[in-house]
Image (cartoon, coloured by chain):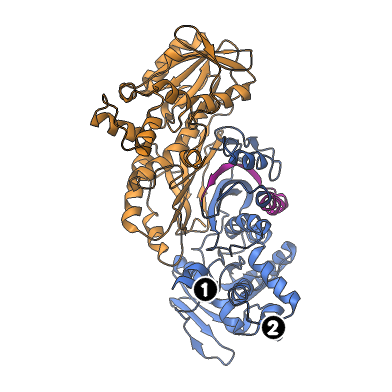
Chain colours: A orange, B blue
Amino acid sequence: MVEPFAATGEFALIARYLQRVGAARSDVVLGVGDDAALLHPPADQQLVVAMDALVSGVHYPAETAAAAVGHKALAVNLSDLAAMAATPAWATLTLALPQADMAWVADFVRGFEALAQQHQVALVGGDTVRSAVPMVVVQLQGSVPPGQALRRSGAAVGDTIWVSGTLGDAGAALALWQVPSHTPPALTTADRHWLRQRLDCPTPQVALGVALRGLATAAIDISDGLVADLGHLLRASAVGATLQLAALPLSPALRRYGSDPVALALYSGDDYELCFTAPPTATAAIQQAAHAAGCGVTPIGVIESTAGLRLQSVSGVQHTPSTTAPGFDHFADRASR
Amino acid sequence: MVEPFAATGEFALIARYLQRVGAARSDVVLGVGDDAALLHPPADQQLVVAMDALVSGVHYPAETAAAAVGHKALAVNLSDLAAMAATPAWATLTLALPQADMAWVADFVRGFEALAQQHQVALVGGDTVRSAVPMVVVQLQGSVPPGQALRRSGAAVGDTIWVSGTLGDAGAALALWQVPSHTPPALTTADRHWLRQRLDCPTPQVALGVALRGLATAAIDISDGLVADLGHLLRASAVGATLQLAALPLSPALRRYGSDPVALALYSGDDYELCFTAPPTATAAIQQAAHAAGCGVTPIGVIESTAGLRLQSVSGVQHTPSTTAPGFDHFADRASR
């Protein structure tokens, strides 16, 4: 029910709290407060629909600040829409909590709200339920002009492979969280904080996604790690690729973190950057689009006809990606193996 | 992500299982398999959006058959759309499970699939995650011509109050499940089975909802119990009502169940019937619409200007509803009080 989230019981308190969250949009005919929301879809656009769940202890450390959970729950869905070149619009939210902890909810809403306002997303409905394990499910919708959505399947031989931002930061933060005694000598307190922010509060590349309409041939967001997600794109496009390891964009903090930053950039997830392809002729236009979107983009390789992914080191040696490296699954799954 | 649900790990098996579920619809441009789904919304219609979560042990007994969980997860959302007079179209699904139990998933999909095919609902995306507590979240969308959605707020003084089907059956099944030693002498084995079906596999009144466009003035689905849900409708419409207790539609099985069937009809939830209002002049048209939709409807009271809900017994005595009766919250919440 989209009604006041939970109609009765102590969870009704949370429900009331969630009635005025997110941006006010003129296309929301009826928001939270009835059996369902009523929306007026934009004319002549396609709808873009994503749904991503975060489970405490699986997708984020259980002690993560509630505001970060609120931010991340929306951010991971915004990232999916960014990878489709969509403009976000409406969210529905299911909040599953062990008890009606209003301080936690207020903090959660603060994080969700700030990102929702930034991207003009209205929260139009959802549900609040009791569950021993905290879990947040967001369904996010947006729109894109017909034929302009970026898919995974459009990469062509000769295309350049690009990534936004830097890679491996969230993975380093996760490793630092998992082994608190690990203190890389060069890593500053500011580095630690910055890396943790990259894990807890990822920045979805929504403006970049929209700017890539008509320029990129394929796109995916990096949630499971570059090798895993680029692998999805290559298979969907029925092509292969070679990556230049020396070209991978690494943050100064990750370089100071030290232990094999390239492996983290290749295999660790949760960065929520975009990986996309475009013909070499589009290079200048892409750099311009990224500049306008306020983010950096880096060419890291090339699409080839031979299936599979090859990694080329500085010395020119090629090898295939590890299949046992960390980053292929979320950390709880890794921990349980 | 709408991509193959879970891209990696053992949950990828479930993901593959969920790639071909539900009806094939021509308005699904891109379904499961990318970062998000692409949908072509119907021209000149409003979108209707509901999201309802079911937690094992809270919204259904933990030992409920997986097929029933699959059915119910979609049914409760179809019921929300029915209460808005909407035609359902697309669902997204988050499945949270302790482990990748493929037999359970196959059974779940069987229940979800049958109801999805019946209502022409396509599953276009979602997520599969690991969680110690099983939980199912469905977001369902449909459409309705502008201005024709039924809301809770349209009831007018003098309107007749109607309900579909029979009330209290799911509550009786829940009571029987909670106290297995309780064996009402008149209750047959067939009755027990029928009541349990009413709890596990509710029938969303989608056809009735659509048939009520232009006839009903307000509507809500009965998930928390007649008194609680009619209360929402009355408050949203700023009116009151008197119900005739003798008019409440009770199934033969509930009558044989025996112990205070009227209280179950008033206060127990999970029946997922519709409660709606309409002017007395619409009576014949409503009966015709219900007949065409294949369900029974019963007039049970009248909308009045005096706020609040009054219950009138056969002898003409009026009283106000209990505020401590069961049915105001889900059974786990009740059990914990």
Name the amino acid type tagged 2.
Answer: Arg
Would residue A85 be visible to someone looking at this image? no
Range of magenta residues: B106-131
Q: For this view, does A292 lie left or right of residue B257?
A: left
Would residue A26 be visible to someone looking at this image? yes
Residue at image coords 61%, 65%: B272
Q: Earlier in the sequence, mark 1 or mark 2?
A: 2
**Residue B256: numbered disc:** 2
**Residue A301: numbered disc:** none
Q: Position of residue A304 (x, y in %)?
A: 59, 12
User: Which is nearer the eye, B141 or B312?
Assistant: B141
Q: Position of residue A323 (x, y in %)?
A: 56, 26
Residue at image coords 38%, 44%: A69
Badge 1 marks a residue whose secondary structure is loop
Single out the residue that lies furthest toward the top. Answer: A315
Name the amino acid type tagged 1.
Answer: Gly
Above or below for B194 versus A71: below
Magenta-colored stretch includes residue A221: no
Mark 2 Cα shell of 10 Å, populated few (<14), some (14-19), many (≥20): some
Magenta-colored stretch includes residue B120: yes
